[in-house]
Image (tube, rainbow, N blue to C red):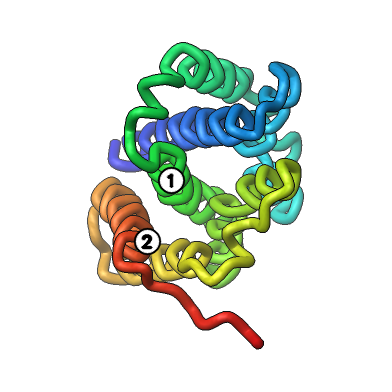
Amino acid sequence: MQEIDSTQLIYAVDLTGTFVFAVSGWLIASKKELDFFGASVIAFITAVGGGTLRDVLIGSQPVGWMADLNYLVAILAGIVAAIFFKRLFEKLRKTMFLFDSIGIGLFTILGLEKTLSFGLSPVVAIMMGTISAVFGGVLRDTLVNEIPLIFRKEIYATVCLSGGILYWLMGILEVNADLQIILTIIYIISFRILSVVNNWSFRAIK
């Protein structure tokens, strides 16, 4: 029963992350004043870019969103939500940052779990979790002519890496599987928010 519950939780995390990143992508595209088609492409790439690269690297074919149309539904729902609640999102302080933080927390877990299910090592799983979380954002920022967050001084990919290590350590300690997932997500989101609020960053190379 525990395995079934965990599988269902991972699936819910995956769809939620897809929705959240679609919203994030649309909001940023809207800020850049792209047209409907352009904004939709950015939302789509933000939502599935990282997961697509991960699936290709670990040999999962077809990639997730091609095998399950619920991912496309989640992206469409994210676009609709961003359109109809745009003014509400704009009134909320740092909405795009919040959605991005939630997204990397959810997708780090997804990448970890999927990679481990393919029998790959925890080290590779942590790397794939990070790729799942940040690569969609890298593509999004590149396409809208922004320097991707992963290449800035901000603590971004490091949050995902440390979250992956925490997840692995809890697995060694045999923490309840669902609790392991939830605590890691909370850790990543909280660490990311705290790093920005407190202006934590790495030194730029000169």
Name the residue tied to disc 1.
97
| Image quadrant in which you'd find residue 49 | top right
Name the residue tied to disc 2.
196
76 to 135, vertically: above or below? above
Give whichever of 83, 6 is nearer the camera.
83
175 to 65, vertically: above or below? below
181 to 171, vertically: above or below? above
Q: Could you tell me residue 155's position as x and y percent? A: 46, 68
What is the crowding at mark 1: few (fewer than 14 residues within 10 Å), some, or many (at least 20)?
some
Q: Could you tell me residue 115's position as x and y percent? A: 58, 55
Q: Could you tell me residue 121's position as x and y percent? A: 57, 68
Give whichever of 185, 2 is nearer the camera.
185
**Amino acid marked by disc 1:** Phe
Q: Is residue 115 visible?
A: yes
What residue lies at 44% left-to-right and 31% top-to-bottom?
A: 16
In contact (CB < 8 Å): disc 1 and disc 2: yes
* SS of the residue under disc 1: helix
What is the crowding at mark 2: few (fewer than 14 residues within 10 Å), some, or many (at least 20)?
some
**Amino acid marked by disc 2:** Val
Earlier residue among tags 1 and 2: 1
Q: Is residue 79 left or right of residue 62?
A: left
* SS of the residue under disc 2: helix
What residue lies at 51% left-to-right and 29% top-to-bottom?
A: 23
Q: In which quadrant will I find the N terminus?
A: top left
Q: CA distance from mark 1 to mark 2?
A: 9 Å
Count every numbered label the image shows and give the total: 2
Q: In which quadrant will I find the C terminus?
A: bottom right
Give whichever of 95, 176 is nearer the camera.
95
